[in-house]
């Protein structure tokens, strides 16, 4: 017994004094933890200050009824139940009975409300009992944020995301800036998997992330999206993209990437404009013609015999879409009518003995390497060189009319934009600035890749020929006497690997007679180009049409026409500098609206869609949005009784 007693005493002393600190620390870790308070991600803004992406705060409210004094509970339960009834609905007796039942059962994590907005959260903190804080009032609030896109699915892939799906688009590229700094607070365990804050304040307050100001123009984006969507739907195409770029600055004003679902609907499936490297077809003839003109091996008046529209080079056929060919025509006319035979014969004659010189021109035009976007997933171009294993005796000829190479739509647009910009090649960019409140963290200026891609003489000739493509060439179907456009059509057969077709037949690898890529690239107005634009549509239904002039050209025209009519480019003086003072003022006005206690439907006319959406949802209304921009009208009248759960429809400008 003495030995047994000694062993017990020894064990107690050992636990208390030798290992005491270790076990005390372990006990604390099991009952107290440091909880992360996640910072709000920064917002993504359009160039004019419209919200493209933002974080909306949501709170789930619990109550620890054990910590609430019985006397305090009895004196204030009616007042608390009354306030809950006003905010959440249901009768006063309903809430009173729930609270009494939870109190009797000694509930420590009793659910009060789910997913309430920030305004309701602030109101609830001031309710009877809750206003006593975490310990005396038992008020427990769990915060989370939801990412919202006020303009819906438009430009969704470019705006992007940074979550469980990965890092895509602008949000993925600028995640480090936008994440902010997380805060910290201590929590105590009150039940299994149930924790509540120890104090009413945080050990470290979270710091919201930086805002990203993009180059996107919401009006032009809306025009571009719907013009492309309508054409894809009509031709039942697989997917397509359209991009509008400001000529002088390289700012991307609109980018739409739409893919088709199995049910025939279209959505922002992938960022095709940045990611998809493909054989461009005839839009690449601009590079071939410019190289020959700039090297002065031909002139626009140089005559080439297109014969009967068909020739064979080392057993491979090159033919024009026009049966019988065009006969003997000038180099300028070769481009205007998009003669495959003509451009191949011109390039073969002058570069077959020195293909390296032609490849060097393509390098100067930005086709041999990626543009270098911060957005992830940019496609890699494929431009063969004579030193490559894949180079063969017809590589040069096929390259001259847009086959045997692979480039992205953004590379093609950058090249066409350089022509419009008097030879100055600027890098396409999506971002203007990164800022937090009024402090700018980083500015993205115009970046010149090549100060002069060709002589001014060559550029002047090229511009005129491109204008003639619309006036009297392959794109004369989109000609308008009201405003000038210049560009080039493109129609390319798709190369398909060995596969089994719909009828179960095995088809050998090769260029398909059923699958095409239709495109159009150009700029407007011709006299003083303000914007360049590219449209690429994959796999239009052949029975309805597949030529670039028929499928893609009208999209370009609609975009140009609507931009021209809404913002006349020949008279306007555009200043795209972000008016941060206006944004800050709107932010202050919005905060003042949030602080009010509403019993009636507020007037949200003239507010931005995001502000109106956030305000109304925080008031408990269900919001439907029609259009983009600012609120023009609302279905529930200003001053009507506020009924939670009711639906309000906002019509936007």
Image: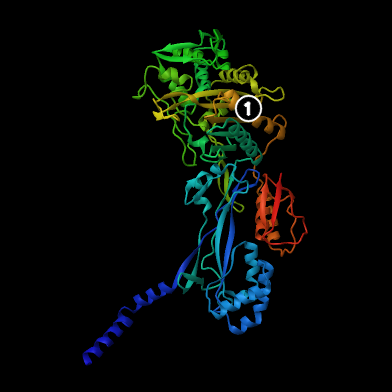
Image vertical order of residue 551 relative to residue 217, above or below: above
Residue at figure coordinates x 62%, y 49% from the top left:
150
Q: Quadrant of residue 590?
A: bottom right
Q: Position of residue 173 (x, y in %)?
A: 50, 45
Image vertical order of residue 367 relative to residue 587, above or below: above
Nearer to the camera, 216 or 443: 216
CA neighbours of label 1 inside 10 A, class few (<14), some (14 to 19), many (20+): many
Q: Is residue 364 left or right of residue 70?
A: left
> Which quarter shows the C terminus?
top right
Residue at figure coordinates x 55%, y 14% from the top left:
322
Nearer to the camera, 236 or 139: 236
Image vertical order of residue 44 relative to residue 57, above or below: above
Q: Is residue 546 visible?
A: yes
Under circle 1, the secondary element is: helix
Image vertical order of residue 451 relative to residue 111, above or below: above
Q: Position of residue 577 (x, y in %)?
A: 64, 42
Q: Is residue 506 left or right of residue 452?
A: left
Q: Is residue 347 visible?
A: no
Nearer to the camera, 113 or 521: 113
> Which quarter shows the N terminus?
bottom left
Instruction: Give the residue at mark 1.
Output: 554
Q: How many marks?
A: 1
Q: Residue furthest front?
A: 503
Q: Position of residue 188 (x, y in %)?
A: 48, 73
Q: Quadrant of residue 247?
A: top right
């Amino acid at each position: 017994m003495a030995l047994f007693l000694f062993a017990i005493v020894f064990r107690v002393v050992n636990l208390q004094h030798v290992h005491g600190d270790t076990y005390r620390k372990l006990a604390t870790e099991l009952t107290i933890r440091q909880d992360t308070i996640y910072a709000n991600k920064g917002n993504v803004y359009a160039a004019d200050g419209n919200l493209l992406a933002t974080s909306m705060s949501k709170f789930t409210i619990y109550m620890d009824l054990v910590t609430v004094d019985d006397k305090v509970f009895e004196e204030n339960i009616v007042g608390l139940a009354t306030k809950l009834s006003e905010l959440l609905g249901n009768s006063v007796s309903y809430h009173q009975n729930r609270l009494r039942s939870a109190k009797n059962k000694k509930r420590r994590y009793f659910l009060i409300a789910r997913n309430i907005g920030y305004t309701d959260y602030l109101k609830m903190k001031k309710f009877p009992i809750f206003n006593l804080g975490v310990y005396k009032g038992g008020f427990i609030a769990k915060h989370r944020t939801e990412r919202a896109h006020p303009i819906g699915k438009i430009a969704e892939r470019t705006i992007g995301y940074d979550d469980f799906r990965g890092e895509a688009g602008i949000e993925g590229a600028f995640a480090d800036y936008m994440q902010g700094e997380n805060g910290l607070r201590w929590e105590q365990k009150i039940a299994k998997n149930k924790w509540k804050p120890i104090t009413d304040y945080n050990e470290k307050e979270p710091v919201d992330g930086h805002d990203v100001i993009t180059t996107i123009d919401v009006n032009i984006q809306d025009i571009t999206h719907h013009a492309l969507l309508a054409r894809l739907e009509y031709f039942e195409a697989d997917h397509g993209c359209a991009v509008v770029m400001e000529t002088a600055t390289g700012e991307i004003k609109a980018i739409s990437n739409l893919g088709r679902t199995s049910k025939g609907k279209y959505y922002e499936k992938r960022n095709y404009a940045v990611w998809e490297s493909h054989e461009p077809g005839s839009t690449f003839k601009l590079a071939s013609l410019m190289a020959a003109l700039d090297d002065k091996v031909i002139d626009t008046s140089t005559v080439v015999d297109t014969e009967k529209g068909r020739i064979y080079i080392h057993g491979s056929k090159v033919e024009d879409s026009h049966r019988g060919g065009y006969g003997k025509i000038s180099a300028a006319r070769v481009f205007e009518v998009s003669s495959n035979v003509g451009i191949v014969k011109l390039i073969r004659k002058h570069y077959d003995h020195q293909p390296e010189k032609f490849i060097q021109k393509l390098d100067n035009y930005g086709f041999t390497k990626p543009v270098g976007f911060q957005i992830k997933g940019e496609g890699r171009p494929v431009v063969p060189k004579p030193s490559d294993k894949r180079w063969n005796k017809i590589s040069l000829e096929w390259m001259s009319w847009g086959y045997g190479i692979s480039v992205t739509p953004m590379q093609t647009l950058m090249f066409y934009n350089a022509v419009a910009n008097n030879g100055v090649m600027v890098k396409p960019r999506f971002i203007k600035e990164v800022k937090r409140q009024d402090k700018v963290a980083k500015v993205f200026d115009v970046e010149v890749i090549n100060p002069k891609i060709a002589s001014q003489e060559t550029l002047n000739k090229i511009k005129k020929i491109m204008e003639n493509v619309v006036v009297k060439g392959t794109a004369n179907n989109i000609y308008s006497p009201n405003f000038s456009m210049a560009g080039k059509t493109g129609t390319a057969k798709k190369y398909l690997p060995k596969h089994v077709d719909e009828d179960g037949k095995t088809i050998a690898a090769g260029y398909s007679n059923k699958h095409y890529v239709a495109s159009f690239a150009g700029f407007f107005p011709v006299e003083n180009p303000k914007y360049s634009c590219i449209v690429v549509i994959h796999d239009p239904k052949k029975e309805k049409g597949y030529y670039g002039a028929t499928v893609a050209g009208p999209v370009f025209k609609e975009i140009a026409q609507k931009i021209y009519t809404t913002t006349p480019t020949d008279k306007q003086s555009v200043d795209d500098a972000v008016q941060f003072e206006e944004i800050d003022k709107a932010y202050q006005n919005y905060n003042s609206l949030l602080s009010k206690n509403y019993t009636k439907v507020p007037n949200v006319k003239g507010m931005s869609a995001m502000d109106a959406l956030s305000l109304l949802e925080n008031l408990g209304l269900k919001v439907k949005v029609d259009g983009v921009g600012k609120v023009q009208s609302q279905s529930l009248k200003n001053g009507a009784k506020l009924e939670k759960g009711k639906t309000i429809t906002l019509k936007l400008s």
